[in-house]
Amino acid sequence: MTDVDDSQRDDAGGSEPPVVSARGIELKGARGRVYGPCTFDVPYGELTVIQGPPKSGRTSLLLTVTGRMRQASGDLTILGLPYPKKGHRIRSYTAIAGFAGIDDLDEAVTVGEAIRERRTWAAPWYRPVRKVKDNAVADVCDLVFGDRTIPSANTVIWELGQLDRLLLQVSIALIRDPYLLAVDDFEQIESNADRIYFTERLRAIAPTCTVVTTAVDSVGDPHTICHLDPGTETRRAPQAAR
């Protein structure tokens, strides 16, 4: 895979090269190892899980495979592009959701305002973005929410429960039509039933946008690419690459 084009989305029959190919990637911070060394491939069109206990570097590894945090060593190819050499292009083709402190939603704004803000970022500077009404919210959220009731445009973010808020974050992340989506630890959803539903919605997205997420425990039968070992060192993750 030498470039990214829409033909990569047309065939998930197993002939596609890996979306991510990591060989011995490792990251160390000021207080020790953050993750790695890790070797794995992320297959095209699947929901893939990075599994490991808290403090094992799962979030940092997710940021690395979307081109947002540089590894210290090892070889990493994302969407056929070498990272960090092609980091800017990689970031334009990837998206993240559910990362505390990075893509948090402002609790004081409405669902419509949150969607409009992301659409404004994604649109050319010369194209005005209209106020988002209920039909536009439905267009953005339909695939991700599935059978679940989609909130109205006037719903304030703080009114949403854990599951609906994370579903909305994923919906907003998909506005730019990325090829790869990373969703941080969905065990932030406390209800087991809601976790199962969320897993199924990620699985529904994966054929058109490969999804990588993290978990402490098994989440059913999604493809697990690596089990991270927290080791014995104290860690502090470095800042994400801008």
Image (cartoon, rainbow, N blue to C red):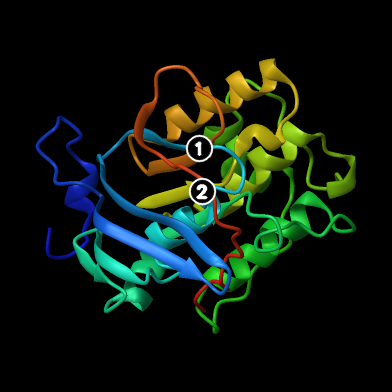
Q: Give the image location of residue 180, x and y in percent.
A: 38, 51
Rendered residue at 63%/24% (across/down)? 195
Q: Residue furthest bottom?
A: 126
Q: Is residue 76 visible?
A: yes
Rendered residue at 36%/31% (across/down)? 224
> Within 10 Å of the Cα at label 2, are there few (<14), some (14-19), or many (20+) other Cα atoms?
many
Q: Mark on residue 193?
A: none
Q: State the quadrant of the N terminus.
A: bottom left
Q: Give the image location of residue 14, x and y in percent.
A: 14, 32
202 up-or-down from 125: above or below: above
103 up-or-down from 220: above or below: below
88 up-or-down from 35: above or below: below
Give the residue number, with chain letter if any, for mark 2.
58
Q: Which residue occupies the foreground of this view, 170 or 124? A: 170
- Please tell me whether mark 1 sits on a helix, a strand or a loop: loop
Res 130 quadrant in image: bottom right
Rendered residue at 25%/62% (across/down)? 76
Callout 1 touching callout 2 (CB < 8 Å): yes
Give the residue number, with chain letter if any, for mark 1.
52
Rendered residue at 12%/64% (across/down)? 2
Q: Give the image location of residue 114, x and y in percent.
A: 73, 58
Left or right: where does residue 237 sit relative to residue 22? right
Q: Which residue occupies the foreground of this view, 55 or 126? A: 55
- Of callouts 1 and 2, which one flags the residue occurring earlier in the amino acid sequence? 1
Inspect the image, locate mark 1, and give the three-letter code of the amino acid beneath it.
Gly
- Please tell me whether mark 2 sits on a helix, a strand or a loop: helix
Inspect the image, locate mark 2, and give the three-letter code of the amino acid beneath it.
Arg
> For the residues marked 1 and 2, what is the alpha-carbon distance in whole angstroms?
7 Å
Q: Residue furthest left?
A: 15
> Within 10 Å of the Cα at label 1, are there few (<14), some (14-19), or many (20+) other Cα atoms?
some
Q: Is residue 156 visible?
A: no
Q: Give the image location of residue 140, x and y in percent.
A: 58, 45
